Image (cartoon, rainbow, N blue to C red):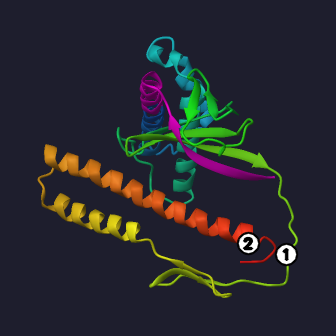
Amino acid sequence: MIYKSFKTELNPNNKQKTLFKQYAGTARFAYNWALNLLKEDYESEKKLKPSAITLHKILVSKKNDEFKWMKDISKWCPQNALRNLESAYNKFFKKQSKFPKNKKKGEKDSFTLDEIVVKDNKIKLPKIGWVKLKEHDYILNGNPKSATISLKAGKWFVALKYETEIQQKEYENTIIGVDLGVKSLAVTSDGETFESSKKLKQKEQKLKRLQRKLSRQKKGSNSRNKTKEKLSKVHFGISNHRKDTLHKITSFFVKTKPNKRI
């Protein structure tokens, strides 16, 4: 079995957008709360590594008094945040990364939920309900393993993980090489050429202008914050453009050369 992922934009109403912010805030709170516990253990030289399950039990025990507001949030929200922390903490002990840092509001706001249903271009999220998808007929109907909802450039996205079986495929002996060039985006060994997009170059030039403008502005000023918002949108536009170009190239190979190795 392998995991296959899909990511697409959501089309939530205003009430759902408010709930998304609450869920992202809950995930951030659970992560930071548990991280502070781990810091205390580590600094006291106990160096304990309680599991996400243990941390979640402690968190649940506080819902009746300290964290009553958390009762309205799906259990999967804090639980998955603690799983993410456990993974980051274990990587630190294996010397694969630095000690985890507290999450800040506005920096990669996201949350992950289980027990998801996708049907007819809508996704059902626990305690939130049915949310419309922006793209139609892109996400598979069914029950994904998990859904991660994230905020980027003022838009909400969902990344879904499906479990699927590996399918063996017969290939011809022909191998096609792909060269990523400078003048052209890509050139194949059998003569196909993919040119660079002029729109992408224009967006990259705009990005450079905004970056120079940002460097001259005073930190904390309203004008600098507005420029940062514009930068975020341009970054998002460039990212989407590159993904779209890559999708078109890969779709071309799948449709025209299905039985050849690339």
Q: Nearer the viewer, mark 2 or mark 1?
A: 2
Q: CA distance from mark 2 to mark 1?
A: 14 Å
Q: Secondary structure at mark 2?
A: helix
Which corner quadrant of the image does residue 237 belong to? bottom left
How busy is the neighbourhood of tag 2: few (under 14 within 10 Å), some, or many (20 plus)? Answer: few
Q: Is residue 195 visible?
A: yes
Given contact means CB atoms under 8 Å apart, are the residues at marks 2 and 1 in contact? Answer: no
- 104 up-or-down from 195: above or below: above
* Left or right placement of residue 69 versus residue 235 in this view: right
- 203 up-or-down from 78: above or below: below
Q: Residue, x 46% and y 61% (percent of image)? A: 241
Q: Is residue 95 visible?
A: no
How busy is the neighbourhood of tag 1: few (under 14 within 10 Å), some, or many (20 plus)? Answer: few
Please give the residue where the numbered disc 1 appears in the rendered image: 171
Q: Secondary structure at mark 1?
A: loop
Task: Name the one closer to the observer, 168 or 42.
Answer: 168
Which corner quadrant of the image does residue 91 belong to? bottom right
Q: Is residue 173 magenta?
A: no
Per the rendering, the mark at residue 2 is: none
**Who comes first in sequence, dot 2 or dot 1?**
1
| Residue 49 % position (x, y) | 57, 43
Q: Is residue 12 magenta?
A: yes
Per the rendering, the mark at residue 256 is: 2
| Residue 123 % position (x, y) | 63, 32
**Span shown in magenta:** 1-26
